[in-house]
Image (cartoon, rainbow, N blue to C red):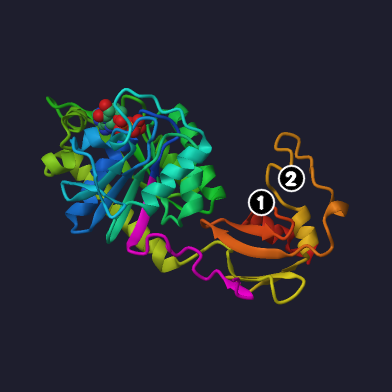
Amino acid sequence: MNSPTTSIKELGKNRLLPNVKNIIPVASGKGGVGKSTVSANLALALARTGAKVGVMDADVYGPSIPTILGITQKPLTENNRIIPVEKYGLKVISMGFFIPVNEAVIWRGPMLHKMVNDFLNLVDWGELDYLIVDLPPGTGDIQLSLCQTIPLTGAVIVSTPQDVAWNIAQKAIVMFDKLNTPVLGIIENMSHFVCNHCGKSEEIFGSGGAKRAAENLEIPYLGGIPIDTSIRLTADEGDPVVHKDPASRPAKEFIRIAEQLVAQVDLRKSQGETKKVPTKVDFLNQPQIQIEWNDGKKSVYSPKKLRAECPCAGCVNELTGQRMIEVNRIPDTIRALAVHPVGRYALQIVWSDGHATGLYGFELLRKLTSSLE
Ligand code: ADP
């Protein structure tokens, strides 16, 4: 039964995996920029500090983490829980463990959503300081599902220096911003090439693009990784450079970037929530719906008007923006039956007319405050 007041103070807290302190997705705008290589080496660099680290390979279209970490065994199941494979001190789960090699994955959104859910619900991650999530490239269903299912500490964006890669990477940044997931920083991979013979550094793709863009977007720049044969060879061998040769120059770059990342995580935690988020929703005590925000503001909404503003694809034509729901067909007696927080960015309202697909983003709710009060 619903309590008359739904406290959503746990918004931003991780109820699904309470023993995992930080969940950090690693994203890129396009494939082949070295996102998986960076994810694996970053995870190993974090583990070197004594932290407990897990890696969730959610790159369903090209799961390369098992290859990079040299894992050939499958995870075991105990009491209907999947036990992650342990390698180099990391707990690892990958879609690659569950799909036959050479089989193309052609999945629709709901199946991808289920995979993310299973990886969070069914895997026995135990206690972790960091869960690194290797995302597929782009801004698709898996990214959305992850942000909706669990509050993320913040995302790391990997880009190569070419403008083209960087422009695409910006789309990922915009997506995380919309989903109220902080971007902890940007890593420029393949930022330069250091000649093994003469030690001269060459900027093959041009360099500094990610750093400049990070400054413009006021996002932390975590550092650059050189293009280096040892990074590729060690990844191909299944023993990444940070584990195989931690004293090497490229390994030291990964270790330095991991330190920057830890600093950003700590900074975010000390700052607390900087965006405006609801802390309490009261929808059963009175005819109106009341929201209390973390900045002290209180908003009051008429259920009928809020129902009419439902932003779901069934109520608004996504191409034309035309509203398909007629206000005069919404009963005056409409009520919210339940309100659930979705990730860090929206509330899902279950209405008494049976409609529940609308996710009311916090920004939308703040915008509607004055017009609907
Ligand atoms: P993504 O996950 O973005 O698709 P991968 O991590 O699979 O990219 O990397 C693509 C290829 O580039 C792999 O062969 C990998 O070993 C190589 N690679 C990635 N980063 C570097 C680097 N800094 N130097 C050399 N090779 C790299």
Q: Is residue 337 above or below residue 226?
A: below
Query: Which quadrant holds the N terminus?
Result: bottom right
Question: Could you say which is closer to the camera, residue 364 or residue 311?
Answer: 311
Q: Is residue 109 above or below residue 122?
A: above
Frontmost residue, 252 versus 83: 83
- Residue 269 location in percent, x, y? 40, 65
Can residue 243 be seen from the camera position used here? Answer: yes
Q: Which mark is on residue 358?
A: 1
**Residue position marked by numbered label 2 in the rendering:** 315
| Location of residue 196 in the rendering, given as x and y in whole percent from the top left corner | 14, 27
CB contact under 8 Å: marks 2 and 1:
yes
Quarter where residue 233 is shown: top left
- Residue at figure coordinates x 31%, y 24% from the top left: 204
Figure quadrant of residue 174 = top right
Residue beneath the point at 15% across and 46% down = 88
Residue 73 picture location, percent across and down: 19, 38
